[in-house]
Image (spheres, coloured by chain):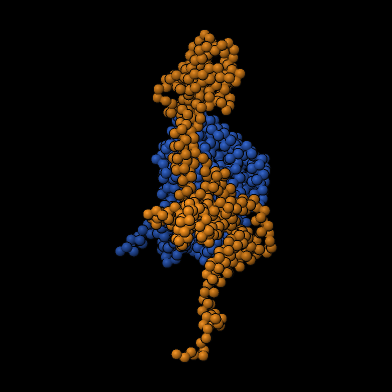
């Protein structure tokens, strides 16, 4: 009885998808695909629903292994042990390149490549390519160009979301007149500071320079870096604008400083996941008390978004694996998770209405609209010794800059020295 | 009974017979201790990939890296301060608790921190030393005590909009005032919701003959114009205002509920109006415990909290083994309690104290979790210690396990003398 039901459901699903992929229901029955990804908790549950849809569609079993923050270590161990998973979702493009060059990855099939080209801006395809071959695509992304603000604090001075950096400074000063700090900076975590810098740099120096600096083709002593740091110092350098104790404030705390009771600041800059911190830690309602505006334009720059994301790659190229990659690259899979919340996709063919609320729709739209002006988080592209280590490299240098925003020259010299060491290896 | 010839006359002295019995243990030891030790040593002479022999370069790099040098310095501070403090406190508490009725219960409580994992203790102390007084208990106490003696000001953080220079004494007007002038003094940097309830809407007073008059108000409102008194803006009551001439305060007054103030009889000549800083002093917020300057003492204090129980237990055991008659004899001979403690108890206890001290030194050299958990990312390099540096270099930063192994070897060499000392001591005691 139950079997019949499943068969019926699968048939219905196959009918819905129109059989475009040429895979009819139950084709892959009996095959198992293993996926390793970073998601745990609620995100794991949501991703498993996506995978469930694949099973219903093709009959292949999918086993998901959550690896959390230790994902690089888990994958490295499994590759050297000779038992890699079929598919992995990796947040570090550098790691993807490393695996590709070590021949651990398989290039994606022609069909997947076609889907990636069709559904995404060219910049995403470039991100997944190593030495001219496409190895993966971004399945889930994060919009790291958002300022979240407290509606209440803005109302008190009659402020509207600023569109330019100079407006932001002006609004900040107006807010500070009410005795509230303008921004709360989570400076105890270095990664929030690298995101600040990247957003300003992408706007002042442009995407081309951004790519060069990410590859360390131009030094950190370049005038474009100075310009970005000086713009940042306009905000960071004014003690009435930045909430006190920033260097002891961790990221979640910086969000609570704005939306908790009592609030000590009016704005906090970070990615779309600020929304979930607000929901779990404060009474503020996202969309009503807590809203966001995109990172303002600096000196007339165009729309640009700094993004993070998890890239799907394959270690095997059997039929079931390829089918799963195809499924993940299609808008169909993204739509499922989009509806569950906490998900953004660079896939431009996921309809806006698939996202559950206005705020998420807006965040997703901005990534798609920015098109080729999207850039991947620079510190995630850099060697971990420079862009991803507590108390060292870029993290530490920008923390020192936050402590003393006048010292632009000293910080640039330190950044360059550290970068030279990390990239040199 | 007759001995069989194949059995040794003196059992346990024949290596031939001992080896088969020792072999399993030796294999396990070799696999778990000797092999990793030797492998680390070899690995420390290779580069990050493990393919290229680099000789002593990892060691040279280690000793020229400023982060390692900070870690060294911190380790020295730890070794000098922490074990001595714990041994001292442990000794005092052990002696004091020896004669009370509920000694065991008391010691049990003091020993409890040992039962908590270092990681969890670290998180506890991270919260204890949190900067915001409504989260960190240490700062909450400090602020409570401070505010009892000097209450915070009425308008913390407020400042004049412009035309005033901040000095140590307060905000002083750039433009001089003379009798007959009217001064408007807009303040910002304060929330309209926090203005005292008795405040009345502000208005500019009419000029008075022979008087300096003025109004201090909060120039913050939606749609209000900067520097002008808007209808909904209220005066700030209770602000001290001073008139200064040649650096001397010649008159002093306080604003009323509508924010107005008047200096009635200022002799002819110019004065500068000053708002003393006592009006605006920020509330005392405690200390930045987790900042770069205090972080190592803070972590050491939490380690002391954890390890004191360990020291007490050992020292108390040593105390109970001291012959009572020696103490009694001293007392009968007329020694004071202090003399008994100083001249009898401590010398008799010294072997135990030494063992405790050396064990703590070994423990301190390997300290890792507390630093990792308590120090926020922004000060982790200031709080760094060798074990943490080793972990960061090996696994945290793109994984240079060659340099990490070099650090591990250095750490081992530092711990080894203390270990040898302890082993020798145990052996001597047994013989």
Looking at the image, is A409 positioned above or below residue B263?
Answer: below
Residue B283 % position (x, y): 48, 33
Q: Quadrant of residue B98?
A: bottom left
Looking at the image, is B397 positioned above or below residue A358?
Answer: below
Residue A196 % position (x, y): 56, 42
Residue depicted at x 37% and y 54%: B101
Residue depicted at x 52% and y 66%: A83
Q: Chain A shown in which color?
A: blue
Along the viewing direction, whichever of B51 and B278 lies nearer the viewer? B278
Residue depicted at x 46% and y 56%: B332
Residue A307 % position (x, y): 54, 46
Looking at the image, is A298 positioned above or below residue B183?
Answer: below
Count every numbered label the image shows and give the total: 0
Q: Is residue B242 visible in the rendered structure shown here?
A: yes
Q: Quadrant of residue A150?
A: top left
Left or right: residue B55 compared with residue A39: right
Along the viewing direction, whichever of A311 and A420 lies nearer the viewer? A420
Q: Which chain is orange?
A: B
């Amino acid at each position: 009885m139950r079997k019949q039901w499943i068969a019926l459901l699968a048939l219905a699903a196959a009918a819905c998808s129109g059989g475009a992929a040429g895979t009819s229901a139950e084709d892959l029955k009996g095959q198992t695909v293993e996926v390793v990804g970073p998601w745990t908790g609620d995100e794991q549950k949501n991703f498993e629903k996506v995978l469930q849809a694949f099973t219903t569609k093709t009959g292949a079993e999918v086993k998901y292994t959550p690896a959390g923050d230790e994902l690089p270590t888990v994958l490295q161990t499994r590759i050297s042990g000779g038992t890699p998973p079929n598919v992995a979702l990796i947040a570090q493009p550098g790691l993807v390149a490393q695996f590709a060059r070590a021949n651990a990855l398989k290039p994606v099939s022609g069909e997947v490549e076609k889907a990636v080209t069709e559904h995404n801006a060219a910049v995403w395809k470039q991100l997944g390519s190593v030495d001219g071959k496409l190895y993966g695509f971004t399945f889930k992304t994060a919009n790291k160009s958002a300022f979240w603000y407290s509606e209440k604090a803005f109302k008190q001075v009659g402020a509207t979301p600023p569109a330019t950096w100079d407006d932001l400074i002006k609004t900040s000063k107006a807010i500070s007149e009410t005795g509230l700090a303008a921004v709360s900076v989570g400076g105890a975590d270095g990664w929030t500071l690298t995101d600040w810098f990247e957003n300003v740099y992408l706007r002042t120096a442009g995407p081309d320079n951004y790519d060069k600096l990410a590859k360390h083709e131009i030094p950190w002593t370049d005038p474009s870096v100075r310009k970005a740091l000086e713009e940042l110092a306009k905000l960071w350098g004014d003690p009435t604008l930045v909430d006190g104790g920033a260097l002891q404030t961790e990221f979640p705390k910086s969000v609570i400083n704005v939306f908790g009771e009592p609030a000590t600041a009016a704005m906090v800059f970070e990615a779309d996941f600020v929304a979930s911190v607000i929901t779990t830690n404060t009474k503020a309602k996202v969309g009503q008390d807590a809203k966001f505006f995109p990172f303002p334009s600096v000196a007339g720059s165009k729309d640009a978004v700094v993004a993070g994301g998890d890239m799907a790659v394959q270690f095997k190229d059997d039929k079931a694996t390829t089918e799963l990659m195809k499924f993940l690259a299609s808008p169909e899979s993204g739509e499922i998770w989009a509806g569950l919340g906490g998900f953004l996709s660079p896939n431009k063919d996921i309809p806006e209405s698939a996202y559950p609320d206005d705020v998420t729709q807006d965040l997703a739209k901005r990534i798609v609209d920015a098109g080729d002006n999207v850039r991947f988080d620079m510190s995630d592209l850099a060697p971990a010794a420079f862009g991803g280590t507590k108390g060292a490299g870029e993290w530490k240098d920008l923390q020192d800059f936050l402590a003393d925003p006048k010292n632009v020259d000293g910080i640039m010299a330190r950044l360059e020295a550290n970068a030279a060491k990390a990239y040199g290896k | 009974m007759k001995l069989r010839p194949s059995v040794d006359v003196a059992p346990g002295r024949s290596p031939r017979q001992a080896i088969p019995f020792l072999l399993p243990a030796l294999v396990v030891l070799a696999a778990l201790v000797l092999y990793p030790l030797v492998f680390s040593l070899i690995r420390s002479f290779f580069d990050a990939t493990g393919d290229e022999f680099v000789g002593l370069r990892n060691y040279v790099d280690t000793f020229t890296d400023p982060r390692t040098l900070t870690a060294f310095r911190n380790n020295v501070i730890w070794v000098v301060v922490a074990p001595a403090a714990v041994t001292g406190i442990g000794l005092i508490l052990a002696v004091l608790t020896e004669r009370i009725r509920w000694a065991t219960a008391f010691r049990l409580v003091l020993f409890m921190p040992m039962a908590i994992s270092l990681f969890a203790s670290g998180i506890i102390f991270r919260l204890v030393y949190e900067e915001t007084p409504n989260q960190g208990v240490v700062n909450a106490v400090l602020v409570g005590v401070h505010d009892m003696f000097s209450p915070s000001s009425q308008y913390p953080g407020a400042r004049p909009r412009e035309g005033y220079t901040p000095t140590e004494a307060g905000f002083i007007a750039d433009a001089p005032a003379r009798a007959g002038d009217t001064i408007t003094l807009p303040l910002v940097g304060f929330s309209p919701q926090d203005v005292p309830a008795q405040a009345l809407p502000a208005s500019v007073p009419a000029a008075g003959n022979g008087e300096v008059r003025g109004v201090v108000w909060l120039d913050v409102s939606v749609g209000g114009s900067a520097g002008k008194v808007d209808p909904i803006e209220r005066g700030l009551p209770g602000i001290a205002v001073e008139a200064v001439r040649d650096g001397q305060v010649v008159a002093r007054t306080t604003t009323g509920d509508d924010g107005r103030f008047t200096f009635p009889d200022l002799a002819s000549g110019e004065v500068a109006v000053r708002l003393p800083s006592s009006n605006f002093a920020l509330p005392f917020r405690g200390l930045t415990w987790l900042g770069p300057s205090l972080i190592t003492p803070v972590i050491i204090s939490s380690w002391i909290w954890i390890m004191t129980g360990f020291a007490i237990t050992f020292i108390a055991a040593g105390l109970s083994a001291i012959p009572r008659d020696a103490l009694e004899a001293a007392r009968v001979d007329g020694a004071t309690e202090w003399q008994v403690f100083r001249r009898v108890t401590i010398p008799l206890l010294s072997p135990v104290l030494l063992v405790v001290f050396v064990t703590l030194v070994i423990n301190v050299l390997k300290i890792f979790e507390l630093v990792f958990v308590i120090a926020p990312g922004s000060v982790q390099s200031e709080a760094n210690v060798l074990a943490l540096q080793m972990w960061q270099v090996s696994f945290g930063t793109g994984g240079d396990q060659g340099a990490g192994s070099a650090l591990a070897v250095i750490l081992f060499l530092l711990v080894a003398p203390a270990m040898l000392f302890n082993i020798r001591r145990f052996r001597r005691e047994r013989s």
